[in-house]
């Protein structure tokens, strides 16, 4: 006979405690990070996989009780073809910017300074737009042009929030560089969790859906 039966006390529900909820949330983040990494391995699926990650995190932020892996798989199948094509375009732009950086480094001091500033500004704008893009993908049902125009407009309209999202991204990359294990377990999902909330706050401040 248990002590609770003897005393007449009701058994304590351990799943209602804050410690259990914290551990469950942490394990969900690890699972999300792992499935996101696996789905991103083909590289061309990076954008669909990251959009699926943001979709799950957004649903949880809005109060939906979703099973992480199941919800991720469902979100990954959503508009997969268009998001894969978008990912190819994203990779192409990133590749062009990377090549530009290499070319600028090989030029003379005068020209490299001017072009370096231009290339750096474009790279920074592209990185900032990338932090906004995924929440726009999962929050708005827009055609290609509307998606890109909305992303560009919001990136320029909320520089403080975009800067915070970029800082979060840089921090996640630094953590991964220092500890690849941390990167494999939680850096991606953790950064996405923070970026989702930072960008969503910026969108709400402008009366936009988030």
Image: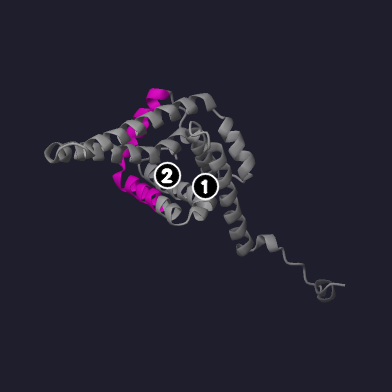
Circle 2 residue = 200
Q: Residues within 10 Å of mark 2 (few under 14, many from 20)?
A: many
Report the residue that reaches farthest toward the right: 1
Residue 91 image point, x, y percent:
40, 31
**Span shown in magenta:** 144-171
Q: Is residue 3 left or right of residue 193?
A: right
* Earlier-in-chain disc, 1 versus 2: 1
Asked if residue 75 can be seen in this view, the reply is yes
Q: Is residue 90 above or below residue 21?
A: above
CB within 8 Å, label 1 to label 2: yes
Lateral position of residue 27 relative to residue 115, left or right: right
Q: Most prominent secondary structure in the magenta stretch? A: helix
Residue at 17% across, 38% down: 112
Q: Quadrant of the N terminus?
A: bottom right
Badge 2 marks a residue whose secondary structure is: helix
| Frontmost residue, 161 versus 186 | 186
Q: Which residue is mark 1?
A: 61
In what element is the residue under mark 1? helix
Q: Determine which quarter of the picture holds residue 13.
A: bottom right
The C terminus sits in image quarter: top left
Residue 173 percent location from the top left of the image: 41, 50
Q: Is residue 156 visible?
A: no
């Amino acid at each position: 006979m248990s002590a609770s039966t003897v005393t007449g006390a009701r058994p304590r529900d351990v799943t209602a405690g804050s410690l259990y909820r914290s551990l469950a949330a942490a394990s969900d983040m690890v699972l999300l990070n792992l499935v996101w990494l696996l789905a991103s391995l083909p590289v061309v699926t990076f954008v669909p996989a990251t959009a699926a990650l943001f979709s799950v995190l957004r649903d949880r932020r809005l109060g939906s009780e979703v099973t992480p892996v199941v919800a991720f798989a469902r979100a990954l199948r959503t508009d997969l073809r268009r998001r894969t094509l978008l990912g190819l375009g994203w990779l192409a732009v990133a590749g062009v910017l990377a090549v530009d950086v290499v070319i600028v480094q090989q030029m003379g001091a005068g020209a490299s300074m001017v072009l370096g500033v231009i290339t750096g500004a474009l790279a920074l704008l592209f990185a900032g737009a990338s932090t906004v893009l995924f929440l726009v993908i999962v929050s708005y049902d827009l055609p290609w042009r509307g998606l890109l125009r909305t992303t560009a407009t919001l990136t320029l309209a909320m520089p403080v929030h975009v800067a915070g999202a970029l800082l979060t991204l840089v921090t996640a990359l630094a953590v991964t560089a220092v500890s690849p294990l941390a990167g494999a377990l939680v850096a991606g999902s953790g950064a996405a969790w923070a970026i989702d909330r930072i960008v969503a706050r910026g969108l709400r401040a402008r009366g936009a859906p988030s």
